Image: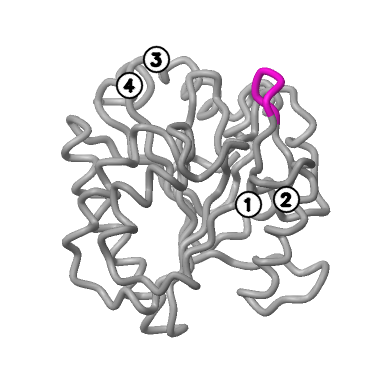
Amino acid sequence: MPTPNVRVFPDLAALTAAAKQFVLEQATGAIAQRGQFMLALAGGNTPKPLYESLVCADTPWSRWHIFWGDERYVPLDHPDSNAGMAFQAWLNHVPIPKNQIHPMPTADADPQTAADRYEQILRQTFGIREGEVPSFDLILLGMGPDGHTASLFPHTAALTVGDRLITVGNKDGQPRLTFTVPLINHARQILFLVTGANKQTALRHIFSGTTDPHLYPARLITGNALWFLDAAAAEGVVANA
């Protein structure tokens, strides 16, 4: 794993403000260069304040395309839905065209069918052929205390899927849809948002570059990644944090 590119912030509020600025800078650059901004969102508690802060952003929303890096296999209106959270916090309040917001489908009886469908949505939206991998302008990721990211959990089959864009993850026997490692690593930019002292052990293992990545899956993310940590997560992990 390359030496991680890490920035440390005193608290969640400061991290959120920096993340908002970073996302908007990435959007401005992508729209200027390619006419659109292809963004994949993370779930969890840490990005929610970021999404709320984007409601008032001054940006050409009509150029944004929104996707999700993973999703629990629940309906959109379920309290555990990553997409549902983002809609309530942000997307319901900005004029992104509805056909440019792409939640992961979770209504099929078979999650693999849903994964296949979302992969086709990606291919159609990016205009790529079978076997090609799209390049997101930005993928937002979180990380759990166990080192998982997206729905790539330790010692699960999803970690080794290399020939697909979307696969079925597993958390305690519950299926989830998730981006695969190759898709994440192909992004132009990846931004990890990590907060809390309970992440320190996983971060130490991931940043060491020597730990088995199947035990701490975030170590599999070797693309152009930037890590935003709050002081509690960085303590004892990053020098001078």
Q: What range is drawn magenta here?
A: 170-174
For mark 2, give the secondary structure. Answer: helix
Instruction: Give how far across and how far down residue 119 sits, in percent.
Output: 71, 60
Q: Reading the chain from its start, which is encountered first: label 3 or label 1?
A: 1
Instruction: Give how far across and how far down residue 171 sits, in percent.
Output: 65, 24
Q: Reading the chain from its start, which is encountered first: label 1 or label 2?
A: 1
Q: Amino acid at mark 1?
A: Pro
Q: Reading the chain from its start, which is encountered first: label 2 or label 4?
A: 2
Instruction: Give how far across and how far down residue 175 sits, in percent.
Output: 69, 32
Of residues 239 and 22, the one drawn nearer to the viewer in this rendering? 22
How many numbered discs?
4
Q: Nearer the viewer, mark 3 or mark 1?
A: 1
Q: Reading the chain from its start, which is encountered first: label 3 or label 2?
A: 2
Query: What residue is pinned by disc 4?
Result: 196
Query: What residue is pinned by disc 1?
Result: 105
Query: What residue is pinned by disc 2?
Result: 114
**Label 4 Cα crowd, 10 Å radius (few <14 / some 14-19 / many 20+):** some
Query: What residue is pinned by disc 3?
Result: 198
**Residue 48 drawn in magenta:** no
Q: CA distance from mark 1 to mark 2?
A: 6 Å
Q: CA distance from mark 4 to mark 3?
A: 5 Å
- Quadrant in which residue 176 is drawn: top right
Q: Amino acid at mark 3?
A: Asn
